[in-house]
Image: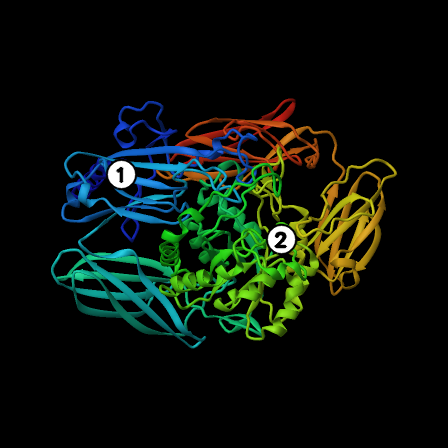
Amino acid sequence: MKNKNYLFLLFAFLALVPGLVKAQDMNGKTLFNSAWSFHKGNINNEISGLTTETGWQTVNLPHDWSIEGPFSDEWASATGYLPGGIGWYKKSFSANNAWRGKQVFIYFDGVYKNSEVWLNGHSLGKRPNGFIAFQYELTPYLNLTGKNTIAVKVDHSEFADSRWYTGSGIYRNVYLIVKNSVHIGLWDVAFATPEVSVKNATAKVIIDVTNSTGTTALVSVNVSLLDRSGKVVCNAQKQTQIAPGKQPVEFEQQILSPQLWDPESTNLYKLKVVLSSKGKKIDEITQPVGIRSIRFDKDKGFFLNGKSTKLKGVCIHDDAGALGVAVPEEVWVRRLKILKDAGVNSLRLSHNPHADYLYDLCDKMGFLVMDEAFDEWEIGKNKWVAGWNVGTPSKNGYHEYFKEWADRDVHDMVLRSRNHPSIIMWSIGNEIDYPNDPYTHEVLNTGRNPQIYGKGYLPDHPAASGLTPIAKRLVKAVKDIDTTRPVTAALAGVVMSNEVGYPEVLDIVGYNYQEYRYPEDHKKYPNRIIYGSENGHQLQAWNAVDSNEYISAQYLWTGIDYLGEAGKWPQRSNGAGLIDLAGFKKPEYFFRQSLWAAKPMVYIGARAVTGAEDRGIWSHRTAEPVWNWKPGDKIKVDCFTNCQEAELFLNGKSLGRQKLSVARNRTPSWQVDYEPGELVVKAYNNGTEVSMNSIKTAGEANQLKVVADNTTFGIKTKGLSQVEVYVTDKDGNPVFNADDEVTVNITGPAKLLGLESGSTTSHENYQANRRKTLHGHLLAYIQTNGTPGKVNVQFSAGKLKPSTVTLIVK
């Protein structure tokens, strides 16, 4: 009976605070995402008009209003031809008497952009940067006995302010944090492993303890490290006097036979810090951490835990097509699994800090991370409005706030994420030295410059010499917080930057699309550590890494298609990815898999024999998985494999076996006179078949086939089912050229978040329950609401046989 009474009181407390239905995590954070009100457009008299303005709608966070569209050429190609504007959010909640004498904070993981926050009409602060996490203390203006109202203004009226889609609004998680007056701040635990071997590791922990009482407090600080089984591998305690303000407490401990973290063995420990006073626990911080060592060498490349490692990386942006930038964690889990299967072991988070959960996923799933701060510094870059490199660009952007905010933004980026073992380098900027956009130098009149705006030196542009002092300032800002990782930047105008000393300020130097400079600069600057920070898909770009011991990395542009950085209307997305906006694999994905993956694989695709091949930096292989051609057509069949040999069969007849070692561009290929049926490729290692792939001639579109990644969900939490929809013939063969419009109808406790085909030109409404397929497939995002019951999701398309998937919430 006592337990029942306790539970009743607990739920009664939670009911007092709308949005706090989830229990606090171990760091005292509680999700504060539900039941916000949103108003698109400005409000008369601003904060005083919150109660009188009409047109509010209820939304749950994260929320991106730009993705609601509509697409229009009145907006900018750079940001996906989607609108910006001004938006307001508000949320009312009741405090709890248990908060009396404590400190209450609100934490935003990201608001794009120019946010200003009020509590009960009192301004808490502003934050221009749309990618940086921040928090405000609510305590001074908190009403403990009545209603409280949080209000947030978001100003994205400068819609052409980025070179890619950013979204608009409170697009990441929001948390409420309740702390005692003596406590540990959210980012105030630093964990590092300065010495690591297979036998022994040194763990260094620094805890900043905050004392807001006004008098000295005697506290006990206990630090323990637990392995995956829950066993305590080290423990230490200190008792200390904490003066008012913030004071560090340091620990250094030895761990015997540590379980090292790497992309194949993502061994994570649990760091537990407990703060006590007078024998009573007053705060606790628990974080996953990893033990690993990193080292970059000018001649030997990158070493992880003492082992030479090539970084097989891709660049990624924040958005997920139909969902904009308000992306549920499950979407990234699916995407990262796909990239992992291709052999990707590293991610460049371009060109800004990403959502908090993505770093956790990289720790758990095994990705080495370059975390990046900025795409521009104190002078604006070109943001194209009518198409890439077309017309007159916009110059709006973060540079407007750089001078005042850059150091603080860098500090906060590093503080938030410094304990993630996945992060191996901090980048202070991307292509800040893009030739003539905006910086210039006389050297641009000479030599080879693959990326350049305008022709040669432009004397009316800012001098490249301005790069170096700013780079020094930003490097210092990083190292003020973290000296355990190198600081880097991605350079587009290396020939120019070499003239002004910018690379010498960096610990390691990223080259964008300038593989041809590797040998020359390695010789000319023998102490420089060089790697590929952004690269095209061509085989020779990878060969420049694979064949040079001193080049440690390649980061493909990109891993995934993304909204924005588009060409002329109607193109509204960039198609440079290995996978499309829906996460479906392109032929280029399989070629990359043949280069990077260890598991035996083979893939075949076909194209008409034309004699012409695109050799551009971002060109993609056109070997599509389709075997529907005209009788007598001469078809080129390309094979991507990491196996020694491949053999092609058409309707059971061998068309010959080829060795990978002698195949042009690592691509065994056959010229085939088309006949309908089945094309099969078998791959062999040491004469044994180890992998197989096939494509069949498809008949007329007949039915829909659906595949859901998850069909069972728990109550009280939102769950996401990602359903792949395929148009097939009567025998179940995919119909590659199908573009049928699919309609989704849902009954039960769930809703449709969006439909994504992967098209880079479609202007269909992302808020609708229907969408055309691309290459005969489509992805549906179905979100359950936590209410128990059965959800039936029916997919239909004209005369095609429909299909239904059933989700269970229990």
Residue appearing at x 67%, y 68% in the figure: 547
Give the x, y percent position of residue 562: 56, 43
Left or right, 285 with reference to 401: left
Q: Which of the pair 410/363 is nearer the observer? A: 410
Density class for disc 1 (Cα within 10 Å; few <14, some 14-19, many ≥20) is many
The amino acid sitting under disc 1 is Trp
- Please identify the residue farthest to the bottom as the structure is shown: 199
Residue occupied by mark 2: 452
Residue 353 visible somewhere in the drawing: yes
Give the x, y percent position of residue 657: 81, 57
Residue 20 visible somewhere in the drawing: no
Q: Secondary structure at mark 2?
A: loop
Residue occupied by mark 1: 118
Marks 1 and 2 sit apart, C-alpha to C-alpha, by 44 Å
Residue appearing at x 56%, y 73% in the figure: 298
The amino acid sitting under disc 2 is Ile
806 versus 201 height, above or below: above
Q: Secondary structure at mark 1?
A: strand
Density class for disc 2 (Cα within 10 Å; few <14, some 14-19, many ≥20) is some
259 versus 766 height, above or below: below
- Please identify the residue farthest to the front as the structure is shown: 459
